[in-house]
Amino acid sequence: MSADRVLSAFWLICSKASAAILAVVLAVPCLAGAVHAAPVAWQKDIRTALRTSAEENKPLMVMVGAGWCGYCHKMLQQTFPDPALALRVNAQFVPVLLDADEQAELVQKLKVDAMPTVLVISPERRIVGRFAGFQSAGQLAARLAPFQRARPAPVARPMEPAFHQRMWSAIQAAAPRSTLEAAKAFSASR
């Protein structure tokens, strides 16, 4: 093989490797954006959210804010887009976003007097957590951690005998029971 052919083969391999590396480098930002692609699945209707909470046995996480509240907007733009927090909220809670101006009567019943306020309401419709003021993603995650519902224990299945026990039982069942039966089986196999 000539030196020219070796050199051109080398450059071909390098260019293909470079193309593969370039593809990986270009894909990384796309994958990083996919992590941010799962925002909190806010519900606006409290009645539907309460029904979902009872059906799924998940507490509600209610964010009460207002259009005029700067810290409310800051939480919606900085706190809730955090991928780990959004994942936790979507998995462990039924998230509800309430506007204090649009639903003033409900906000008054919930005894919310500061903006923003995050409430945790059990599926039994009791307020079990109340956090007023701006919360960073880390602060809110730490405050929501105690409200995670314990998952039900898996249903225990009856233990199956181990493989060797099942095989020994099968061998014993297939084996003749007496010497006469063994002799007949041996003679039949010839």
Image (spheres, grey):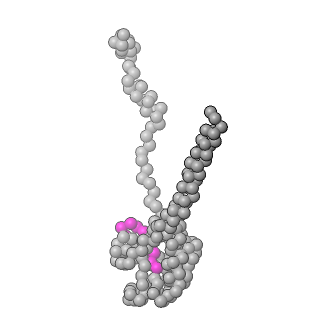
Can residue 49 be seen from the camera position used here?
yes
On-image quarter of the N terminus: top right
- Residue projecting furthest to the right: 3
Q: Look at 45% across and 37% down and name the residue there.
A: 161
**Could you tell me residue 44's position as x and y percent?**
38, 78
Q: In this view, does 163 lie above or below 135?
A: above
Residue 60 sits inside the magenta stretch: yes
Q: Is residue 183 above or below residue 81?
A: above
Q: Look at 38% across and 15% down and name the residue there.
A: 182
Residue 129 sits inside the magenta stretch: no
- Tally of numbered tags: 0
**Could you tell me residue 21's position as x and y percent?**
58, 53
Q: Look at 45% across and 28% down and name the residue there.
A: 168
Q: Look at 42% across and 76% down and name the residue there.
A: 96
Front-most of residues 62 and 187: 62
Q: Is residue 160 left or right of residue 84?
A: left
**Could you tell me residue 28's position as x and y percent?**
55, 60
Residue range (magenta): 54-63
Q: Is residue 6 left or right of residue 119?
A: right
**Which quadrant would residue 139 be assigned to in this image?**
bottom right
On-image quarter of the C terminus: top left
Front-most of residues 176 and 119: 119
Q: Is residue 161 above or below residue 90?
A: above
Can residue 131 be seen from the camera position used here?
no
Front-most of residues 146 and 140: 140
**Could you tell me residue 186's position as x and y percent?**
38, 12
Q: In this view, does 68 lie to the left or right of 137?
A: left
